[in-house]
Image (cartoon, rainbow, N blue to C red):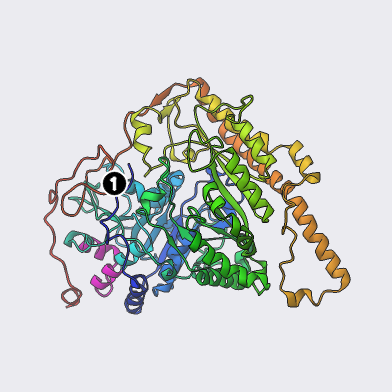
Amino acid sequence: MELPSRAPGEILLPQGEMTDIRRRLRALAAQRDVTSVIACAFDHRTRVLPFVYADLRMVPAGVRAIGSALVDSGFSKTRIVLQQWNKNFRPDEMRLDGRIPDLVLVSSMHLHSSACDRLIRAANQIDPAQRPLIIVGGPRFIYEPWQAFSHDPQQPKGADAAVTGEEYVLLSLLEVLLTLRARHESLRSVFERAKESGALDAIPGLVYGRSAQPEGPVEELVDTGIQRLLGNLDELPHPVLGYQLLETPGRGTTLAAQALPVNRVRKHCKISSLVLTVGCKFRCAYCPIPAYNQRQYRVKSGERVADEMGRINATYHINTFFGADDNFFNDAARTLDIAETLARKRTARERPYGNIRYFTEATVHDTLILREHLPLIRRSGLTGVWMGVEDLTGSLVKKGQNKGKTLEAFRLLRESGIYPIPMMMHHDAQPLVTFRNNYGIVNQLRTLRQAGAIYTQVLMLSPAPGSKWYGDTFSSGLAFASVAGRPIEQWISDGNYVVASKHPRPWIKQLTILLAYLFFFNPLRLLLSLFWSKSNIPHADDETRPAEETARYTPWTKFKRWLSLKARAQLMDAALQVVGMAGLIQTVRRTLPWTWQLMRGRIVACDRPPASKIPMRSPQGGPASHALPGTELAAPHALLPVVQPHTCESKAA
C-alpha cells in the first residue's frame, strides 16, 4: 500500500528549478491580481495527549511553507487561517482585499477530516459565478486524494483539485493557469479549460475530477502521478515570510482587515517548526515516510538553517524551534554540518543564536553512531530529542534498539545536556505490567523514567495510510468499521483511540494506554520531581544571553540571573508533569466514553481497505499512482469530448 517511486533519474527536480519557477511566477503575478486564502483544518476534539499545548502554540510547517512560497512568488495578497486560532472561520463569508479570494487552499491531516470537509462545503456555498478555485493538500490528500471529491448526487460539490506533493506542485499548477488566463478571467474558469485540454496532465502530483455535467458529481479522477522532489532544500522559500500572513486569532467567521501584527506573533506562537531534514533510512512497515520520500534523504545546509532561525528570532522573537525531521541523525555528515554551524555561532553567544534552542526527532541506533559528537550537537542548541523507541524490547519494531542500547543512548544524551523524550507504541500482545522482564508498557515507562525521560508519548498501533501494513490491517479484519453502530471517524484515528485490534477485549487496550499515562503523569511524581528532578542535567542552567549584555550586569543582577537559571532547570520536570496531567484530564474525558463503547457495543471489522468509490486513472488511461487495490479503473475519454485548449491571445482577441 506504499506510494510508488518515480523512475531513477526522474525523482529529483533539476538543480535551481524551484528558484526559477518562483522567478517566472513573479513576472506573471505582476500582471495578474490574485488573492488567496490558506486554511489549516483543525478538529478541536483531537486535543489530547501528547499534543496538548504544542497543537495551539506552533504554526504548522505545511501551511506556513505554502504561504511563504506564494509570497515569494509575487502573490502578496495571501492570508493563512488556522482553525486552531479561528475555530468559527467560514470561507463563504471571507473577504480579502475587499473581495472574495481567487484561490482557497485547504490543508488537512486525516484526523482533521471533518473540519476540512466543512471548510470545503462552506467554500462551495459561494455563488458559482464568484466561487474561488478550491485546492486541497496536506497528509490527508497525499495518500488518499479521492477524499477531496464527492460522488454523491445529493452533495456533488467538493474540491477542484488535490495536490499530492509539496510546494513545487502547487507552483507548477499556478504557472500553467496564469499562463493560460485571459484578462478578467477567474482562476476557476481557466482551471476548467486547462484540465479539459490536458494542460494539467504534465504536472506530476495532481488529482482532479471530471464530470459530464458542469455542477454534477465527479465521475472519474485523473491522477497525474507521483511528484518530483526538491533535492536541495536550500531552494525553499524562507519560512520567515509565512508568519506575516497569519490571521489574527478570534471568534469571528470572516477575515480581519489586517494580518496578525509582527509584534503579536510570539504571543500566539511560542514554537517555530522548521524543516531541517527530510527522510529516514529505516523501512518500518507501519510508517509511510520512506516511500513518500522515494527513498531519498534531503537536507538544508547549516548556513541556511542558521539564517532561518536567526531571521525568525530577530523578526518575531521566537527562540524555541522544533525540527520537523523524520530522523535528524539519519546522516552523520549532514547532521554535523548543521550542528557545527549553529554551535560556532552559539558558543560565542552571538546574537541572536545564544538564546536559540531547538528540539527534533531521532532514533536510538543513530544516536549511538553520533555518540562522540553529542557534546557538539548540544552546543548547537539542541535541547531535546523525541526518540523513536517504540518498543524497548524490540519484539514489535526492530530499529536497532533494545533495552541496553536505549539506556546507553539516554545516558549519552543526558550527559551531553540533551533531554531524551521516548515515543512508545502499544500493541495487542503487550500487557500493562509484567514480572521479571520489560515487556509490559508500564515496565518500559518505569525503566525509561529512571533513565531520565521527562515526557513521553504512548500511542496504539493504528493503520497509517501509505504504509506497508495499511492494506493488511483492513483485509485481515484488524481495523474496525464500526463500534456500537458508530462508524469509525477520522478524528479518533490518531493512535490515542483503539480502532484496530484483534484482542478479545479491546477496551482493555484503551484502559492500558490511560493507565500508562497515569503512571508517568501523576501528583506523586510531580511532588518527587520537585526534589529529585530529571531535568537538572548538564548545561540546563547555562547562560544563553549575549556576552555584551551580561557584561553590564551588576553583582545583584548576576545573582538573580543565576538563581533564575538554576530554578528553571530544577523545575522544568515538575512543569512538564503539570502539562502532562492537564493533558491526561482531557485524554480521560475524551477516551473514556470510547472505552465504554468498546466494552458494551458490537464491533464490526473491515474486510477491505477504504478505496476510492470514484473510478481513477492516469492521464494515459492506466492505473492511477495513488489508487488503492479495489479502485475501479476509469475508462479514458468516457465523458465529454476533450475541449481544444484556448490560448491567451485568442481569448483576449
Amino acid under label 1? Pro
What percent of the width, then of the height, locates residue 491?
47, 41
| Number of residues whose C-alpha sits closer than 10 Å to that of mark 1, classed few (under 14), some (14–19) or many (20 or more) | some
- Is 351 rendered above or below residue 486? below
Q: Which residues are magenta?
A: 175-194
> Is residue 385 left or right of 623 when viewed as pictured?
right
Q: How many marks?
A: 1
Relative to 546, 477 lies left or right: left
- Quadrant where the image shows the N terminus: top left
At 43% from the left and 66% from the top, the residue drawn is 233
Whether residue 617 can be seen here: yes
Residue under numbered circle 1? 156
Which of the two residues, 301 or 249, is positioned nearer the viewer here? 301
- Percent across and percent down for residue 473 are 38, 33
Q: Quadrant of residue 352?
A: bottom right
SS category of the residue bearing label 1: loop
Dominant SS of magenta comes to helix
Foreground of the two, 115 or 273: 273
Residue beneath the point at 24% across and 73% down: 182
Percent x, y of residue 5: 30, 52
